Amino acid sequence: MARVAFLGLGVMGYPMAGHLAAKGHDVTVFNRTEAKAKAWCDAHGGTHGDTPKTAAKGNEIVFACVGNDDDLRSVCLGEHGAFAGMEAGTLFVDHTTVSAQVTKELAEAAAERGIAYVDAPVSGGQAGAENGQLVVMCGGAQADYDRAEGVIAAYAKACRRMGEVGAGQLTKMVNQICIAGLLQGLSEGLTLAEKAGLDGEAVIDVIQGGAAGSWQMVNRHKTMLAGEYEHGFAVDWMRKDLAICLAAGEDLGAPLPATALIDQFYKDVQAMGGGRWDTSSLMARLGKLAG
């Protein structure tokens, strides 16, 4: 069992930290809203720190799962940041989906203090976090990954090292690109089925076991057909992730034309008031266009 800290108790971090405590790890948490940290402690035991530094102090591994690049910088750096409370030889594991730039920046800042760094973005959404069924893609030195893997297993159904620091984030970019394309295709297919007077449920029942099948098809077609989007992974967060993908594509010389187009479709969904809707709400945009 390990002494760990977990920074960020949002819809993902709260249950992830809970799984660590349930597995017997000694967990200290931090959240910008202290009341949420206290509520977590009431539910799971453990302790909370009033700053990332105090939460990190004395722990072997510090995990973070926050919102974006700036949020991650704020919990890592500065007088009250986690790095200021961590000793040389400890390990920082970032579960946030962030840019390759901030990953490199923070890994270098950690190295200056003798702190190991693993970028470990996750896939599986809120349900995956709550059920301990996340997929975790990691970048970092093999020895550092080996230290983290057994602890991450508390909330992961799969965890794999993809390469050196930054490889986890690049793999997550591939994941988000594929999801965006799948959802646009599924939205268009279901829209055509509706316009043709087909039974959408029957269509999916036939095709989901064939070459077109996907997690998105199995888990999202019912709510898409019902026009229900108040759940799941928010469009606002997907656009944040796709901006990271598009920037990386430009830097690497990898053309991403469909991703750029679907990103603009998500912008349309935001303009419809759907910023907090699930990413499957691309179908709502098609419904509006069809009238």
Image: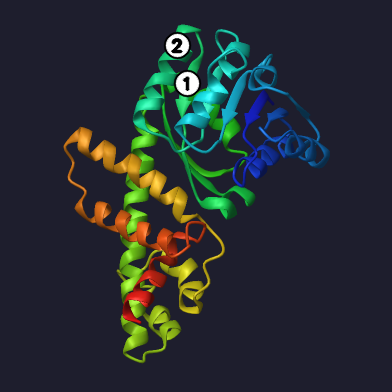
Q: Earlier in the sequence, mark 1 or mark 2?
A: 2
**Which residue in the structure is indicated by mark 1?**
117
Name the kind of residue labelled 1 in the image.
Tyr
Label 2 environment density (alpha carbons within 10 Å; few <14, some 14–19, many ≥20): few
224 displayed left or right of 55: left
Residue 54 x %, y %: 70, 17
Rendered image: mark on residue 111: 2
Residue 137 x %, y %: 43, 38
23 displayed left or right of 135: right
Q: Residue at x 70, y 36 (%)?
A: 33
Assess whether mark 2 and mark 1 are in contact (beta carbons under 8 angstroms).
yes
Quadrant in which residue 100 is drawn: top left
Asked if residue 205 is positioned above or below residue 41 in the image, the reply reads below
Q: Looking at this view, is 3 or 126 the one in front?
A: 126
Q: Secondary structure at mark 2?
A: helix
The answer to whether one can see residue 207 in this image is: no
Name the kind of residue labelled 2 in the image.
Ala
123 displayed left or right of 231: left
Residue 254 x %, y %: 18, 41
Asked if residue 175 is positioned above or below residue 291 in the image, the reply reads above
